[in-house]
Image (cartoon, rainbow, N blue to C red):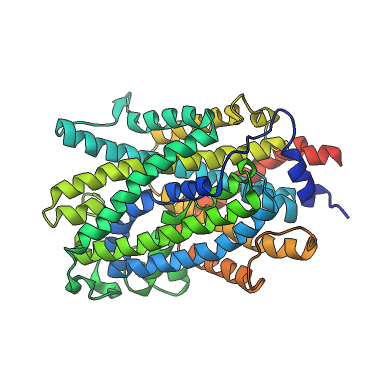
């Protein structure tokens, strides 16, 4: 019997039927290869070029490679659940659409609001990082003194980030296939740079730099106490989250940011020619590729220099992959890496914005947001939603510093992973009749392990991150009751 009120669900059949609604139909022209490229394009970016060195120097030491493995395990378990859901319900919206079919409208809204935190805030954070790398590259070309920001009336305007977001907004509005082709070219460049780091950096590796693999907690670093301490460290009575076991666990939760984005593949299911087979291959294939690359890069970087040389400076200067090469007097290689990072971050912002647009598209088609946002243009893309997302990301990236945005994105993504993992188990029980071209093996064991792994990583984020997350979600609840519940298409039908 269909449920009503906050728990009303939208059937899988209705979700699929809505994909053919005139005026809001997406063009189906993506292949499994396109999806794999999207996945690799968004995952290889900010995490590998910026987080690896900083996390090793401030939290984990050489055990950063193990931190990547722990984060990859959690992602892999969740990826299996995403693959089954996306092949069963090949509709735009990813975790939002999946939750609408299993937990009901209110939970779907919450997860949709949560995905705004992952995709939009993530886009803004990475765009500011892109602007910083642009400044570095321009300095190589024109000398020091080049800047990608200026002050107007006491407000800092980041014109580099603004330029990137504006260009990508027009590109996304022009069509998903075109975005995929551009992403493919840029992704090839940055994968080549990552392979260069691994192969060339290997010749500078010194075994002594791996000892101690897990530095003792009292060995220094950026201590984290108070609201900047991880929740698990606080519950366990720890005094710091830097180095030691607590540092390793905190590092795993932080480098999780490097894996964010593979779930964007699920948001493009509606635009895929053969989603039941292509989507699982795209999700699992991209995750497998980047995991191998991440572990190899982290091993090389921490083998090239002492982890203490990668710690954030007293002046707040953060280290990157290029730092390891500069400390080995290979400045030209550091310059090459900076160019690769610039290319890498470009596709990250583009694909995160693509994911955000598709989530807004799905929510507006259901009436939880203004229906006008679901209208598609001549290129088969939701142009209005694209322009809106572009404007919001541009404003955030232009006027606000990145700050703690990485952790905010992490907690939102992990929350989405938990709901998807639980949703797969619910849908197996409530709709065993649905055709599934891909099934999670050993369910419910894998589903429960995915939930526990994601919850574990969430507990190793800081207390302040949790506070900000609860405030954001509370705001989402207000928006739902003020607008979404009253304009819900499903609610009006009932």
The percent coordinates of residue 283 (x first, y second) are 54, 55
Which quadrant of the view contains residue 217? bottom left
For the image, the number of numbered tags is 0
Say whether residue 236 is left or right of residue 438: left
Q: In which quarter of the image is residue 78?
A: bottom right
Q: In front here: 47 or 434?
A: 434
Q: In this view, does 388 lie to the left or right of 106?
A: left
Whole-percent x and y of residue 271?
A: 61, 41
Please name whichever residue, 197 or 444, is drawn nearer the observer in this view of the structure.
197
- The one nearer the camera, 132 or 29, is 29
Q: Residue at x 76, y 35 (%)?
A: 487
Q: Where is residue 353 in the image (x, y as percent from the top left)?
A: 50, 39
Q: Tell me if residue 14 can be seen.
A: yes
Looking at the image, the residue that sits furthest to the right is 1
The correct choice, above or below, for 282 with respect to 362 in the image is: below
Locate the C terminus and report the quarter of the image it occupies: top right
The answer to whether residue 250 of the structure is visible from this angle is no
User: Residue at image x 60%, y 71%?
Assistant: 446
């Amino acid at each position: 019997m269909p449920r009503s009120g906050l728990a009303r669900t939208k059937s899988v059949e209705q979700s699929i039927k809505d994909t053919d609604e005139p005026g809001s139909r997406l063009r189906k022209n993506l292949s499994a290869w396109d999806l794999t490229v999207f996945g690799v394009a968004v995952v290889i970016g900010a995490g590998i070029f910026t987080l690896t060195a900083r996390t090793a120097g401030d939290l984990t030491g050489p055990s950063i490679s193990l931190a990547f493995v722990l984060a990859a395990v959690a992602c892999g378990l969740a990826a299996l659940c995403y693959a089954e859901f996306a092949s069963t319900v090949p509709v735009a919206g990813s975790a939002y659409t999946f939750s609408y079919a299993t937990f009901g409208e209110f939970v779907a809204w919450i997860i949709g609001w949560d995905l705004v935190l992952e995709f939009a805030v993530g886009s803004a954070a990475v765009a500011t990082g892109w602007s910083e790398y642009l400044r570095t590259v321009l300095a190589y070309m024109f000398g020091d003194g080049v800047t990608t920001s200026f002050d107007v009336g006491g407000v800092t305007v980041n014109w580099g980030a603004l330029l990137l977001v504006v260009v990508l907004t027009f590109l996304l509005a022009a069509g998903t296939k075109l975005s995929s082709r551009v992403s493919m070219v840029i992704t090839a460049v940055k994968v080549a740079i990552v392979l260069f780091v691994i192969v060339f950096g290997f010749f500078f590796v010194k075994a002594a730099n791996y000892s101690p693999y897990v530095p003792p907690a009292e060995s220094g670093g950026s201590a984290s106490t108070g609201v900047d301490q991880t929740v698990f460290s606080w519950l366990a009575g720890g005094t710091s989250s830097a180095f030691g076991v607590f540092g390793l666990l905190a590092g795993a939760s932080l480098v999780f940011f490097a894996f964010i984005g593979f779930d964007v593949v699920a948001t493009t299911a509606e635009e895929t020619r053969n989603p039941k087979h292509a989507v699982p291959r795209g999700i699992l294939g991209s995750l497998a590729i980047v995991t191998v690359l991440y572990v190899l890069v982290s091993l090389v970087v921490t083998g090239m220099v002492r982890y203490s040389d990668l710690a954030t400076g007293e002046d707040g200067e953060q280290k990157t992959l290029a730092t390891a090469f500069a400390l080995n007097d290979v400045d030209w290689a550091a310059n090459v890496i900076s160019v690769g990072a610039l290319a890498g971050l470009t596709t990250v912002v583009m694909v995160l914005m693509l994911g955000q647009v598709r989530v807004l598209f799905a929510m507006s088609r259901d009436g939880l947001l203004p229906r006008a946002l679901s209208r598609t243009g001549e290129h088969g893309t939701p142009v209005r939603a694209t322009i809106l997302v572009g404007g919001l990301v541009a404003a955030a990236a232009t006027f606000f510093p990145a700050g703690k945005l990485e952790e905010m994105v992490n907690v939102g993504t992990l929350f989405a992973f938990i709901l998807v993992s639980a949703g797969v188990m619910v849908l197996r029980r409530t709709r065993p009749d649905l055709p599934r071209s891909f099934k999670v093996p050993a369910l419910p064991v894998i589903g429960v392990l995915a939930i526990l792994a994601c919850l574990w990583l969430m507990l190793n984020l800081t207390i302040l991150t949790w506070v900000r997350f609860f405030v954001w979600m509370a705001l989402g609840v207000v928006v739902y009751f003020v607008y979404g519940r009253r304009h819900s298409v499903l609610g009006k039908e009932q």
